[in-house]
């Protein structure tokens, strides 16, 4: 049985066209930024002699300029943001078309959807790496912290696997190794049957020796944990800063910065929801207490992942808005700060203008850091659901092994990301509240 068929390829074409139309018609790549307020401090010029002028901080002002489409299109990293948004939308559209085709009984295997969701998952991680670890605006100190944190993640994962805990989570490196080995055997066997080599080999007995070493899968999982830690701790720190600014703005800012109760509730939910997904991947609550079937468990997990990803993406505008407000807070602090002379105050304003330019110029970077974790959850949810439908549609050994490998891998990623997100956000919020970190 072929991996692709006509319906699979037919879904991809209309999906790509529909995605391109929606992306252009609604400018989806700019929606997380357009309409937000950008703050531009200005210094008025005053005459110091008949033939010369100088900038003075005594009559400073702050321009509040809404970001429009033209401005956003010229921002650095916009191409990366647009690629991430377009790929995510394409993944969602193709997944919906695949589910609709399965509902009407068309013979689709969903392999295109599986490949797309896997690719978008990697794209989300790579996008985070480009705008955080590889960005020239990221300080050497932050990069060192990333390496240290990723090392801790790697060592922690290896230590967890070495303890060999049994029956805690539904996923395990052992399950991924067994599924990978079985999947490889099935693929080789199918290739040999197609080329009529099985008869010459006497039944293909050598396939029994194909194995995926458990230690190799454990190392791969640990390396993936280290990579996720390196690229996602910046997003978690950015979220913690925005969350603290949203809930605890400066006393003078209450009349200038609007805060809505629903936004606060959504941000609180964003901290809790990733770690709240852990019970969905644990044996005791799902199988022993509620006795949920395997099929229902996969559907519940997929729905929870999709809702979590959607929440992250919807909250991205709030996070970018709080980031842009840091220029306003800095301007007010400088304007009402204690400076001995006008020269010192004017110098402080010169630095402030440069900082405001950096804040505005890195707003796309902030949007990517806010959206990419949500894309990661969306891709994992669609990947899990696609693997389930793939197995349900084909019903052969290869699809069963694919489902097993996907479930073990997605389970590990979601469990690790949930713990990482909760720890980094919680610790960073404590640092902000104690004054160790500032806006």
Image: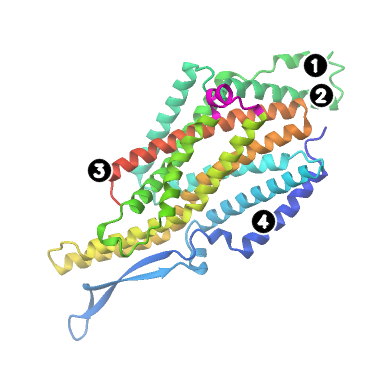
Residue under pointer 1: 204
Near mark 4 (Cα within 10 A), the count class, few <14, some 14-19 or many ≥20, is many
Q: Which type of secondary structure does the marked residue at label 3 adopt?
A: loop
Q: Is residue 395 magenta?
A: no
Q: Position of residue 3 (x, y in %)?
A: 78, 36
Q: Which type of secondary structure does the marked residue at label 1 adopt?
A: loop
State the mark number for residue 19: 4
The residue stretch that appears in magenta: 281-294
State the mark number for residue 192: 2
Tags 4 and 1 touching, CB below 8 Å: no
Near mark 2 (Cα within 10 A), the count class, few <14, some 14-19 or many ≥20, is some
Residue at x 19% of width, y 86% of height: 50
Q: Position of residue 337 (x, y in %)?
A: 19, 62
Residue at x 22% of width, y 66% of height: 335
Nearer the observer: mark 3 or 2; the answer is 3
Query: Earlier along the polypeptide chain: callout 4 or callout 2?
Result: 4
Q: Which type of secondary structure does the marked residue at label 2 adopt?
A: helix
Query: Earlier along the polypeptide chain: callout 3 or callout 1?
Result: 1
Tags 2 and 1 touching, CB below 8 Å: yes
In 3D space, how far apart are the residues under numbered discs 4 and 1 (Cα atoms)?
45 Å
Near mark 1 (Cα within 10 A), the count class, few <14, some 14-19 or many ≥20, is some
Query: Earlier along the polypeptide chain: callout 3 or callout 2?
Result: 2
Q: Is residue 107 visible?
A: yes
In 3D space, how far apart are the residues under numbered discs 2 and 1 (Cα atoms)?
8 Å
Query: Earlier along the polypeptide chain: callout 4 or callout 1?
Result: 4
Residue under pointer 3: 434
Comparing 129 with 313, the one in front is 313
Q: Which type of secondary structure does the marked residue at label 4 adopt?
A: helix
Nearer the observer: mark 4 or 2; the answer is 4
Q: Position of residue 277 (x, y in %)?
A: 51, 35
């Amino acid at each position: 049985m072929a991996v692709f068929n006509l319906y699979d390829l037919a879904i991809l074409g209309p999906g790509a066209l529909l995605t391109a139309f929606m992306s252009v018609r609604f400018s989806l790549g700019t929606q997380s930024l357009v309409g937000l307020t950008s703050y531009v401090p200005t210094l008025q010029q005053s005459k110091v002699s008949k033939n010369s002028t100088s900038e003075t901080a005594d009559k400073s002002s702050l321009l509040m300029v809404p970001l429009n489409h033209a401005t956003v299109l010229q921002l650095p990293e916009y191409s990366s943001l647009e690629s991430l948004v377009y790929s995510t939308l394409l993944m969602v559209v193709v997944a919906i078309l695949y589910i609709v085709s399965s509902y009407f009984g068309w013979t689709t295997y969903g392999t295109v959807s599986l490949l797309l969701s896997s690719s978008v998952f990697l794209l989300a991680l790579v996008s985070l790496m480009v705008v955080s670890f590889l960005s020239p605006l990221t300080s050497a100190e932050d990069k060192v912290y990333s390496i240290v944190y990723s090392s801790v993640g790697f060592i922690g994962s290896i230590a967890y696997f070495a303890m060999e805990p049994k029956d805690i989570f539904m996923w395990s490196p052992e399950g991924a190794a067994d599924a990978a080995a079985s999947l490889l055997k099935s693929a080789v066997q199918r290739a040999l049957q197609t080329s009529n080599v099985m008869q010459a080999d006497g039944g293909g007995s050598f396939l029994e020796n194909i194995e995926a070493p458990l230690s190799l899968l454990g190392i791969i999982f640990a390396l993936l944990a280290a990579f996720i830690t390196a690229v996602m701790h910046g997003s978690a720190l950015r979220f913690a800063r925005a969350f603290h600014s949203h809930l605890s703005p400066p006393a003078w800012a209450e009349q200038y910065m609007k805060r809505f109760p629903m936004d606060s509730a959504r941000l609180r939910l964003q901290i809790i929801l990733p770690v709240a997904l852990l019970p969905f991947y644990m044996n005791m609550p799902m199988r022993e207490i509620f006795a949920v079937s395997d099929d229902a468990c996969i559907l519940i997990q997929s729905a929870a992942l999709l809702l979590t990803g959607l929440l992250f993406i919807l909250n991205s505008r709030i996070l970018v808005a709080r980031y842009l407000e840091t220029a306003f807070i800095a301007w007010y602090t400088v304007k009402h700060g204690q400076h001995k002379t006008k020269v010192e105050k004017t110098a402080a304003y010169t630095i402030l203008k440069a900082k405001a330019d950096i804040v505005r110029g890195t707003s796309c970077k902030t949007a990517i850091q806010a959206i990419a974790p949500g894309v990661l959850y969306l891709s994992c949810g669609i990947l899990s659901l696609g693997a389930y439908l793939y197995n349900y549609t084909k019903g052969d050994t290869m699809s069963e092994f694919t489902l097993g490998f996907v479930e073990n891998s997605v389970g590990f990623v979601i469990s690790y990301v949930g713990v990482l997100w909760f720890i980094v956000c919680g610790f960073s919020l404590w640092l902000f509240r104690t004054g160790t970190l500032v806006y």
